Amino acid sequence: MRAVEITPRGVELFDAAHVAAEPLAGRLVAELGPGEAEQLRDLLTRFAYPAGGKA
């Protein structure tokens, strides 16, 4: 069995990337109607993590 652990520097990079991506994400969903951004996020999450547990 192998375990993968994120380093403190990795956490910093992940957080910085997340912050940097927020404005782009906002622009991508700017034209969606009420509730559609949440619906899109739900659908993408279900696509990435199907009910069968296969990713």
Image (spheres, helix red, strand yellow):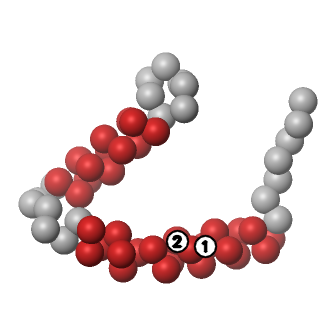
Residue 37 place in picture, x, y as percent: 23, 57
Up the image or down, 41 lies above or below 49; here it is below
What residue is rendered at 26% in x and 75% in y? 27
Residue 12 place in picture, x, y as percent: 70, 75
Q: Are marks 1 and 2 in contact (CB under 8 Å)?
A: yes
What residue is rendered at 75% in x and 68% in y? 10
State the mark number for residue 18.
2
**Amino acid on which the number 1 mark rests in the picture:** Asp
Considering the numbered disc 1 on the image, is that residue within a helix, a strand or a loop? helix
Instruction: Report the quarter where the N terminus lies.
Output: top right
Name, please, the residue furthest toward the left. 33
Q: How many marks?
A: 2
What residue is rendered at 45% in x and 74% in y? 21
- Left or right: 33 as drawn, with respect to 28: left
Q: Which residue is mark 1?
A: 15
Q: Please rate how many residues cluster around mark 1, counting C-alpha atoms within 10 Å: few if below 14, some from 14 to 19, many from 20.
A: few
Q: Quadrant of residue 2?
A: top right
Q: CA distance from mark 1 to mark 2?
A: 5 Å
State the mark number for residue 52.
none
Up the image or down, 32 lies above or below 48; here it is below
